[in-house]
Amino acid sequence: MSMKMLPTRDGYGHGLIELGATNPDVIVLDADLAKSTRSDWFQAKYPDRFFDIGIAEQDMIGTAAGLALGGKIPFATTYAVFVAGRAWDQVRTTVCYSKLNVKIAGAHGGISAGGDGATHQSLEDIAVMRVLPNMTVIIPGDANEAKKATIAVSKIDGPCYLRFAREATPVFTEESDPFEIGKAIVLRPGKDVTIIAAGPLVYEALLAHDQLAAEGISARVINMHTIKPLDEAAVLAAAQETGAVVTIDEAQMAGGLGSAVAEFLVNHCPIPVERVGINDTFLECGLPEELAVKYELTAKDFACAAKKVIARKTLG
């Protein structure tokens, strides 16, 4: 397992550069945050296909919609908290209602903008994007996966939301690993419990697997990088084969990955599910690693949740 550290937003920047070289229809827009979102990498190489709309997120989404109607593939880029908040009406009514081919990139998602406080810590974006008809929602686990996801969304038609982290996180996948939208990846086999995660916290899930293995517990780890459409076959197989599931959200638990998994299982395979994530609160300011400890988003917490849900399986 590699311990190379890179922000997932770097993978977005590299993906945009590759798309710029291979697809002349790709256009990149930003809302005055190009350096932070890494869209300035595309700007440096393809300035005639880059537009800084300024601090006007609604205008950026509207412009992206117009470009999509003109046959282009626009990537509208800003912080996750702004595009999911300020521009949600335009995303809903202008983009999703008409099923326009707009790709939305939300940087600094989750707790990675910890020091900027609650106004910048995007914890609600997964829920509000997932609820929209026609929207695909993806949270890449590391920089390699972020690049693949960026390229992959350019090849499908319709609205897509990509969420990226600010801080450098472990690169635990290889450049050669396959990536398919809507297709989960089983990173570790297991028979006692399944841990389902997305984004950089997948790495913590892998550490939790190792902690549990040391105690004789066999934990399956699934990288559910695509929140919508959910890989229902992978969830069903995990439920039937392990009988207990832990879900991990670097977001509000309401409406997130855990909700998606639980909503599916309640209808198809009711088993004990333990959801881990932010529980209906705004966070304090702090370093991301400090926030992860305070709000129980570490490997130790995931291992505890796994043992808790296994106990519920035994009681059942």
Image (tube, rainbow, N blue to C red):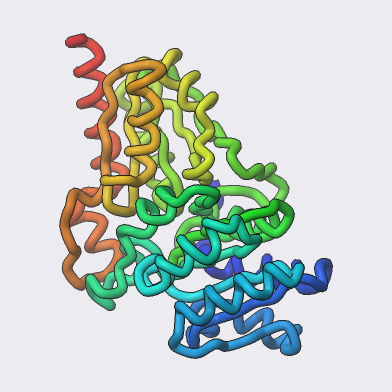
Q: Is 264 located above or below residue 17 in the figure?
A: above
Seen from the viewer's position, the closer of residues 249 and 8 is 249
Q: Is residue 22 left or right of residue 74?
A: right
Q: Is 160 located above or below residue 87 in the figure?
A: above
Q: Which residue is rendered at x = 57% and y = 69% of the image?
A: 10
Q: Which residue is rendered at x = 28% and y = 34% of the image?
A: 303
Residue 264 visible somewhere in the drawing: yes
Residue 217 visible somewhere in the drawing: no
Q: Which residue is rendered at x = 30% and y = 68% of the image?
A: 121
Q: In this view, does 70 lie to the left or right of 245?
A: right
Q: In which quarter of the image is the C terminus?
A: top left
Q: Could you tell me residue 99's position as x and y percent?
A: 60, 55
Q: Could you tell me residue 259's position as x and y percent?
A: 33, 38
Residue 80 sits in quarter: bottom left
Q: Which residue is rendered at x = 53% and y = 84% of the image?
A: 35
Q: Could you tell me residue 171's position as x and y percent?
A: 54, 55
Seen from the viewer's position, the closer of residues 107 and 204 is 107
Residue 262 sits in quarter: top left
Q: Is 279 located above or below residue 288 in the figure?
A: above
Q: How many dots with numbers? A: 0
Q: Could you tell me residue 243's position as x and y percent?
A: 36, 15
